[in-house]
Image (tube, rainbow, N blue to C red):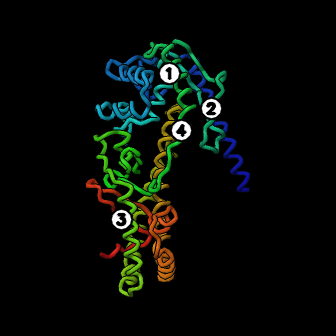
Amino acid sequence: MVGLYAWMYEQESQNTSNRVKETLRTRAKKGLYKGSNAPYGYEVQEGKLVIKDDNTPNIVRRISQEYLSGSGRDSIAKRLYNEGIPTPDDVAGKKNASDKWNDSTIRLILTNPHYVGDLVQNRSTTVSVTSKKRKKVESEKQIIVRDAHIAIIPRDMFDAVQQQMKIRTKYITAPKKHLFTNILFCKDCGTGMWYRSNREGYICGSYARHGKKACSNHLIKENLLKDTVLTDIQKLVKQIDKKQYLNKLEAQSKKSKQNIQKRLEKLDKKLEIIKGRKRKYINMLAEEIITQEEYRENIEANNTEINELVEKKNNLLTAMESEQTADSIEKLKQELLQFLNFDELTPEILHRFINRIEVKDDRTPFIHYRFSASIPD
């Protein structure tokens, strides 16, 4: 019986979804924009997109012009952020809007056909009523009303941008990974550190992407990090046999687990709040309070937030699993003794003994080992 009810619920949900989609298609064919948030640079007046009487249309033009002049999406985003230009989410008054422009925001503006005066709707749809995944709708099934409103970007410029994006994507190479990649973070903003070969070290990723307005560079040399970690582990090897030190290790491990548990509980509460928000958007879509496009944007934003929280939760769970018991401390001792005579820091050694490294503004590294107690002086 449970299976039958589930099937009936799915069928009714599918019927509701189809009715909502059909209503939206009918409205779109009339050339009316039904979203509550107009594209950046526009506002809605009597169902039509109208160019706003502020600086946002100029920013849209500037982004296309700078891209065609050779600037990358990241560099354009960095300039706009450092100049204090409000982001599209800021302008729309969205909750928890970031003041930082980023690659994806620039890409959405560069590829949005609304800016050439075309009203394009039904560009994507859900795979099924039971799935949140979306698929791109074939171009012939999209609802396109050409010249439905005044353009911000000339059509030839828009086409040139699309061609340039295809060319650049073809020749982009993947960034190289270095020894401390994915283990080295800025202590002030929490962003991962980026390796820079011309500096022979790492700088704050937020600084690299957005400039000094976001954070300072936190530059730290790779050789300094290697020497610091090697020295620390060698000190630990000398102390590991001391009973007093092992007791301290166990006590700090217990305390660390308690702190991690509290943080996990807070994350779970935040996740429940976001899931409740998603259920609210489903009801709003069914009642036609919001369009599918708005629903998709809100769900994507919520999913991004959920993914970030889940990543934090997984990191905490990993940290908790690595906390030491009496047996695991003995195992740690044996592992350390295996490396007693090593004089080179390898990825194996690094990831076996270290969770993460945080770099302070004064470029001092704070190392979080997979064992709780700090290295004795």
In space, the residues marked 3 and 4 are separated at their CA atoms by 32 Å
Viewed as shown, does residue 129 lie left or right of 4? left
Check whether the beta carbons of the residues at disc 3 and disc 4 lie within 8 A of each other.
no
What residue would you read off at disc 3? 228
Q: Earlier in the sequence, mark 1 or mark 4?
A: 1
What residue would you read off at disc 2? 136
In space, the residues marked 2 and 4 are separated at their CA atoms by 26 Å
The mark closer to the camera, 3 or 2, is 3
Q: Earlier in the sequence, mark 2 or mark 4?
A: 2
In space, the residues marked 3 and 2 are separated at their CA atoms by 50 Å
Q: Secondary structure at mark 4?
A: loop
Q: Could you say which is closer to the camera, residue 83 or residue 67?
A: 67
In space, the residues marked 2 and 1 are separated at their CA atoms by 21 Å
What residue would you read off at disc 4? 173
| Image quarter (top left, top right, bottom left or bottom right) of the N terminus | bottom right
In space, the residues marked 1 and 4 are separated at their CA atoms by 20 Å
Q: Quadrant of residue 36?
A: top left
What residue would you read off at disc 1? 161
The mark closer to the camera, 2 or 1, is 1
Q: Residue furthest bottom?
A: 243
